[in-house]
Amino acid sequence: MGRLSFITTCMGRLNNLKITLPLALQPDCEYVLVDWSCPDKSGEWVKLNYPQAVVVSVPGKQYFNIAGARNAGAKAATSDRLCFIDADMKMLPGFVNAVLDKLKPDCWAQTDNFCYGFAGTIVCWKGDWKRIGGFDEGIDCWGYEDVDFKQRLNKAGLKEVRCSSRFLEHITHSDVMRVKHYKEKDLDVSVNKSLRRIAMKRLGKIPSPVYSN
């Protein structure tokens, strides 16, 4: 068990992963890569080049579901502290210590930058991830699964703390790339569908997610 388990998901982002994964192999930390039916066979590449990483393979998926992929990675993680970080995020020296200095019991952490990429970097205790039901896999479009998860952490009474974003860099890419492997290809429509599901949960018209093994 390491100090921190990094969880990265991949479906069609192997080019990004080749840049970011080596930077995320931190001392006394675990790296979990979730290959969500990646057409680039990212899991095979990781096993061949970085055997110290943990690979979770989820075959047979036509479309990406980052919530489902992140839950699969969290289940496989062995640390009691989880850091969800996207394949297009470069981790700079000092990130681990900055996070661990902030993540106290009954807290969860995110960066002070809410732009693309940065907003999806979330650090929490594994017990809290499980307690609130993990990420909502019903949010199967691009966007806002991270916002929903953070809102439910807050609703559970956990304190939000923020880490400096200077320890991260985002690899920029087009909106076309963002939605490429989702069923819904229109970014605005995708976001609206996600927001609609979150609103329906708030109104009690659909249930919140429940963790299951």
Image: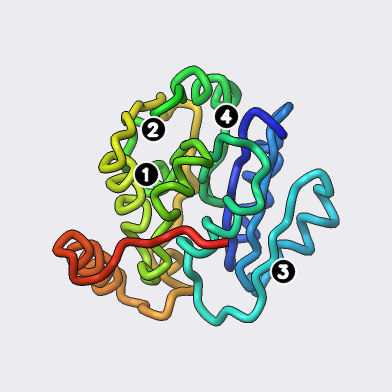
Q: Are circles 4 and 3 on residues that touch, CB within 8 Å?
A: no
For residue 119, the mark is 1
Look at discs 4 and 1 and give the one toward the viewer.
1
Residue picked out by circle 2:
111
Residue 62 coordinates in the image, percent (x, y)? 55, 82
Earlier in the chain: of badge 2 and badge 4, it is 4
Q: Are circles 4 and 1 on residues that touch, CB within 8 Å?
A: no
Other residues around mark 4 within 10 Å, as few (<14) / some (14–19) / many (≥20): some
Q: Is residue 129 left or right of residue 188?
A: right
Earlier in the chain: of badge 4 and badge 3, it is 3
Residue picked out by circle 4:
92
Q: Secondary structure at mark 4?
A: loop
The type of residue carrying mark 1 is Ala
Vertical placement of residue 92 versus 211, above or below: above
Residue picked out by circle 3:
41
The type of residue carrying mark 2 is Thr
The CA distance from mark 3 to mark 2 is 30 Å
Q: Nearer the viewer, residue 92 or 59?
A: 59
Residue 192 coordinates in the image, percent (x, y)? 22, 69
Q: Nearer the viewer, residue 202 or 42?
A: 202
The residue located at (33%, 35%) in the rendering is 113
Q: Secondary structure at mark 3?
A: loop
